[in-house]
Image (spheres, rainbow, N blue to C red):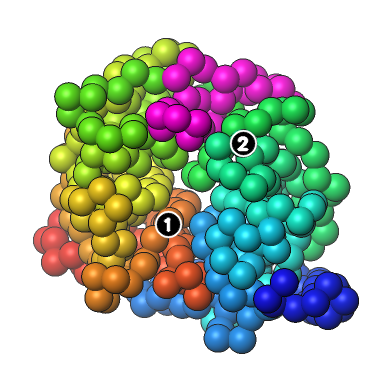
Amino acid sequence: MNLLNLKTKSAYAASLALAFLMACNSNSNQSAEGETKDSLVVEKDFVFGDTRPFEQCHASTLVRLDDGQFLIAWFGGTKEKDPDVGIWLSKGQPGHWSAPVEVAKIREDAHWNPVLQKTADGKVILYFKVGKEISHWETWVKTSDDGGATWSEAYELVKGDKGGRGPVKDKLIELADGTWLAGASNEVGPWEVFVDRSEDKGKTWTASPYFKIDTTEIKGKGAIQPTLWESKPGKVHMLVRTTGGVIGRSDSEDNGKTWSTIKKTTLPNPNSGIDAAKLSDGTIALTYNPDTENWGSRSPLSLTLSHDNGQTWAEKIDLDKGKKEDEFSYPAIVSWGDSVAVTYTWNRQKIAFWKGSKADILKLSGASK
């Protein structure tokens, strides 16, 4: 192990866990009302500094808690796919983040793609993958009833599954009828998209058939990692990462039970992660890398808005940009009211955070709306 020996790592994790709990307790008196007194961030913030207990980090996820604080998780270790990679967590607000704590490490296989979800009753659910290879990873789950201070024992989402059930990268959504719908994908052979649905608040799951994809429009291995939203009750929409140099789209008119063929959009995509969120007025905010080449540049990372349910995309800003070889990737986005928060990988060295309102985005883009 190139990072820390097991004894040192265990001691470090224990000390950080104590610091994390103290931070959670001290922050618990901070109200959402107090947060509104602060000006919104229009520049990125780093969740941790240069000193960290892992060499690389990637694939962040976030939720906003009822008190206005954020929980952010990611995978970290020597490098992606190495057996020492686990799931790490921090809590707070810009400029005030708790020290990273490893909250999931069930065995010495790589851990991947955490996804955080907050339920209506305030419980936080952490989904994550475990396995030596993406094609045969498993989906595991932990839950927290106290805003991420303590976590349950991990359990498999679908016992015995190999290949990945539940959310593969982006948050799941709760439909108007109460159904939980998770965007999922499989990378055994062709890249294929499906949805996993639960009608009992996540206790049991049913996987859909793989989606059809228009291979005249989208070339290569296929599509993975859907991001979802519901525009009206029963009408669900999906954008997907593809190998064809564009973002793909599929739509459902029946609560996500059946879906249209995945077709290309006008949005470029270099085969890199994307994520979208719906604001309270119906605006869709999407964050993505706008490069047209398969396995192309993951710089810049952009944020764009749609006012017509994703048919066209208007205002766009760059959250981060640098040299072509830089990596600002795998964004996660959440919304509340007219505001959004985004986390993303910063050159595999840090997790960056940005938040702002729709008005901020319009102003930064130069729009006159």
- Left of 298 or right of it: where is 168? right
Q: Residue at x 62, y 66 (%)?
A: 76
Q: Quadrant of the C terminus?
A: bottom left
Q: Is residue 199 magenta-colored?
A: yes
Residue 293's spot in the image, x, y percent?
20, 51
Circle 1/circle 2 CB separation < 8 Å: no
Q: CA distance from mark 1 to mark 2?
A: 24 Å
Residue 348's spot in the image, x, y percent?
48, 70
Give the mark, 1 or 2, whose residue is nearer the N terminus.
2
Say which element carries label 2. helix
Q: Nearer the viewer, residue 90 or 279?
A: 90
Q: Residue at x 34, y 18 (%)?
A: 212
Q: Nearer the viewer, residue 316 or 135?
A: 135
Q: Is residue 187 above or below residue 104?
A: above
Q: Nearer the viewer, residue 80 or 145?
A: 80
Mark sitting on residue 201:
none
Q: Range of the magenta residues?
A: 181-210
Q: Residues within 10 Å of mark 1 (few under 14, many from 20)?
A: many
Residue 229, can we see it? Answer: no
Residue 96's spot in the image, x, y percent?
60, 80
Q: Nearer the viewer, residue 79 or 129?
A: 79
Q: Is residue 215 above or below residue 66?
A: above
- Left of 181 or right of it: where is 364? left
Q: Residue under circle 2?
A: 136
- Residue type at mark 1 is Pro
Mark sitting on residue 331:
1
- Residue type at mark 2 is His
Q: Quadrant of the N terminus?
A: bottom right
Residue 137, can we see it? Answer: yes
